[in-house]
Image (cartoon, helix red, strand yellow):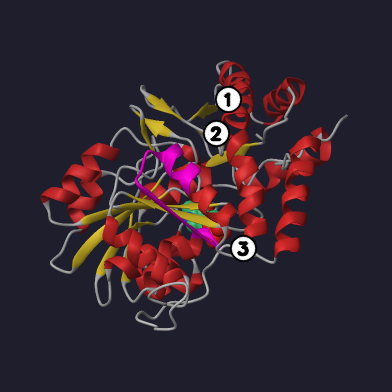
Amino acid sequence: MAKVPAAKIQFLPEDRTWIAERIQEVLTSGQLTLGRYGAEFEKEFAELCGTRHAIAVNSGTSALEIILRSIGIEGKDVLVPTNTFFATAAAVIHAGGKPVLIDMDPESFAIRPEDVQKALTAKTAGMILVHIGGIVSSQTQVLVDLAREKGLWLVEDAAHAHGSSYHSIRAGAFGLAGSFSFYPTKVMTSGEGGMIVTDNDRIAGESRIYRDQGKASFTVNAHVRMGYNWRMSEPHAIIGLKHLERLPAMIEERRIIASVYDKGLMEFENLYPLKIPEGGVCNYYKYIAVMKNAQDRKALKAELRERYSVSLAGEVYEEPLHKQPVFAEYAVKPLPVSEDMCARHICLPIFSGMKRSEATQVIDALKEVIG
Ligand SMILES: Cc1ncc(COP(=O)(O)O)c(C=O)c1O
């Protein structure tokens, strides 16, 4: 039986040649950071998101921290979903704020307006919305409006959501600013890297200062902010540019696999996929399916791998942040929806270049172990 991997990175041979040629060029010129390819990557990424600015940085984590430092969150509370990656909450702490972990919507895996309302205090400065698995929740605009009404800001952690949208507004373009990750597991990669997108001139200007050691400008040696080396190198920008060009095709390939899964899962009693909201476009960073009755996920994954050669992808997320030892001091109360949903979902393998026959193999294997 052929092995179905959990994920795979796709760089077509002609794309590898294109990338190698340009890396040769920057190696020859010596312009290895903050050069024309970085600027081009920013321009094209801003076009993708429909925002006025995009600022390339060296990771999704630094993109988030830079946005939060640019806003200024020292001593303030920031609402963060508990079902997210470590970096979402860590960035708040690194920028001097306090993450207040909140529960999730079982239908979209995003935060819900009612949970935000309940968590608001005089110390709340804003909230981070994470588009889990590439799904932009139908409640996104409601959350944006709620934030505005309360005098708060909303930042999108769009690390999963390159090219996703809801009613034609792209992920990253709803809030004050959005951050993206180009880590190799993501729908598009630059090796390592991240991007900040915003329509706000001040946040854009501050972000450029923060990413380059807090320097007022590239050429002047005046350090005006507590910045860091958060720059993206030209070789990374070159890789990212090529994957950005391929993004629509890569999403289409994922969508085809998702439709095989959608159809296949219709026959299942104990497993249902998360719905993409009407008017939404998902990039299918993850294909999330929920077990109605919880089964031992570790055993299930081992059986799929050993008996059916199918590797499931990593969950979003296996454990909510309030259960992570490093965030113990922020775990002030149980967050039951996330505890339940984190334990009860699986992520089916999905990647560009995946064959329909591989998706069918996954469905057939799941039928045996879940049914
Ligand atoms: C939701 C989320 N936020 C932030 C990050 C951090 O991105 P990076 O790994 O590029 O620092 C990731 C992923 O890696 C993520 O999944």
Residue placed at 73% from the left, 41% from the top?
A: 8
Give the magenta range.
43-60
Mark 2 CB near ligand 1 (8 Å cut): no
The location of residue 58, given as percent across then percent down, is 56, 63
Q: Position of residue 358 (x, y in %)?
A: 76, 26
Res. 245 image quadrant: top right
Secondary structure at numbered mark 3 = loop
Q: Position of residue 156 (x, y in %)?
A: 36, 50
Q: Residue at x 37, y 75 (%)?
A: 216
The residue under label 3 is 233
Q: Quadrant of the N terminus?
A: top right
Whether residue 170 is visible: yes
Q: Which mark is residue 284?
A: 2
Instruction: Give the residue furthest to the bottom.
Output: 222
Q: Residue at x 25, y 49 (%)?
A: 115
- The disc, 3 or 2, on the residue closer to the chain's N-terminal end is 3
Residue for badge 1? 255
